[in-house]
Amino acid sequence: MPAANDIVIQRYLDRLHHSARRSGLLYAFPTKSVKRLDLTRLRVADTSLPNEAITRLIKSEGGKLQFDLDISQQEFDDEAIGQSGQPTVSTALAKGSEKSAQRALYYALTRGLARTAEAFKRETGVRSLWLAYPLFYARVEDEMGKLANILSPVFLWPIKIEGPLQFQGRVVISRDEDAGRPKYNKALDIWITEHLSFNPDDPSRDEFDEISRTQLEDVVRRLYQGLRPAPAVSMLDDPLPIPDRQSLEKLSSPRVLNSAVLGLIQWENQALTHDLENLLKDSKTTDLLNDFLSGKGRETNREIVIPPEHDRFHVTDADPSQERAVWLARSGPGLVVHGPPGTGKSQTIVNMVADSLAHGQRVLVICQKRAAIDVVAARLKAHGLGELFCVVHDSESDRTKTIRGIKNQIADFNSRATTTTVTIRRSQLAKEIERLENQLSEYSEAVCGLGGFGLAYRDLLAKAAKLCAGSERVHRSMI
């Protein structure tokens, strides 16, 4: 990728990070509900677990922490069938008995965090479960004279949480290898630049990809050594509980806390940020994206290859401009079809979908409004394509219906007409259409083509008709 495109993409990323002002990227305070947990809550299982979690999970992608919690057999069975009620997590962890605290932690991790993160991933395609460590705290006065606090992760380590039901009460916390490398919190970087008039040097990816506690401490110390006063950085001891807000507000200068948050951290435009970061990492862009980033236009007068009749798969009527759109959709990096209501955009989309399916391609149709997607679906179904697509309005509520529909399609597959029969019949019809079109073309050429006198046959007829009309007038005047 050209260096100029890297700069443009980085500017887009900076603007997206700048917009993440009210997210967990800057406000990662633990919550009373099961969303974010102070890592030291793991001490209800074993006092060494918080320290082991940090050491293992930041070290490498294969890092894993496994421990067992004491929960009753009945509650374990209920968890397996999804019927158990969830204890009040904050109360049980803080004030409950040892067993109730372990039970609350088990449900908080396996049900509250793991399941919520999985549902978010299914809906958005991005991951939201992180180990946030270490934490940066600062308190500043905003433009209105109000004091604002931030508690922000310096780094985010992607994790996953599993509760294998083969082992009662077991919890496994590991690095999420599919989520890629850990992230440096650029939103915090931008906030510090704006409010503290100091711009930390971004660490390179290699500096914190696979790293020991000692090396990480060194990286963080270098990040903030330019602050005055420079915050003390001590990250080799056991992590400390996160102070409450009142205690934090008493701090007079920014601090780096040897504390961690385990849980859900989501931010605005997270999917878009993820895609742009991958573009920077892979250094690959399409021609279309290069043109977009550079601001250059593309040639609009592309040559259209008109396919033969047997390679046309319209299922609705189409005028020449609509046909042109279908042929253009077969090639090139992209196509924009626009027009006022009633000009046939929906039926053109239906023809594009049918054409793509006929060529063995998969198609994703996305509409901003539900009514629009229902119109396209109804047209496809009306033209016999109802068994080749599924409609998903909600990733959660429509899942059962979608799976059942696919199952029925597979079961009914053998009862349909064979591909060979359909292909033969279609080929015969295509040949008949081409024969009739050739006849019409020959007639059109005979009538409209230029003859030996340099005039078309229809023009000769027009002149002859004028001559006949003139001779009739002369004849009448002589009489």
Image: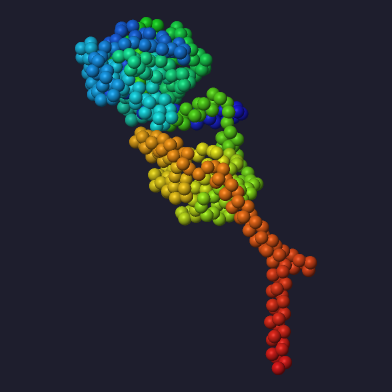
Point out the image quarter for the N terminus: top right
- Report the front residue among 186 and 298: 298
Residue at point 20%, 12% (across, down): 97
According to the image, what is the colour scheme of the structure? rainbow
Point out the image quarter for the C terminus: bottom right
Left or right: residue 317 compared with residue 154: right
Up-down: is 341 above or below 133?
below
Residue at point 25%, 25% (across, down): 83
Residue at point 51%, 52% (across, down): 316
Count of picture labels: 0
Up-down: is 276 above or below 244?
below
Q: Residue 419 is drawn in which quadrant?
A: top right
The residue furthest right is: 452
Left or right: residue 421 compared with residue 17: right
Residue 316 visible in the shown view: yes
The residue furthest bottom is: 479
The picture places residue 428, in percent across and down from the top left corner, at: 60, 51
Q: Residue 157 is drawn in which quadrant?
A: top left
Left or right: residue 90 compared with residue 451: left
Up-down: is 402 above or below 156?
below
- Report the front residue among 163 and 322: 163
The picture places residue 30, in percent across and down from the top left corner, at: 31, 20
The picture places residue 467, in percent across and down from the top left corner, at: 72, 80
Residue at point 50%, 44% (across, down): 417
The picture places residue 85, in percent across and down from the top left corner, at: 23, 24
Left or right: residue 31 compared with residue 222: left
- Report the front residue among 180 and 329: 329
Residue 253 visible in the shown view: no
Q: Residue 440 is drawn in which quadrant?
A: bottom right
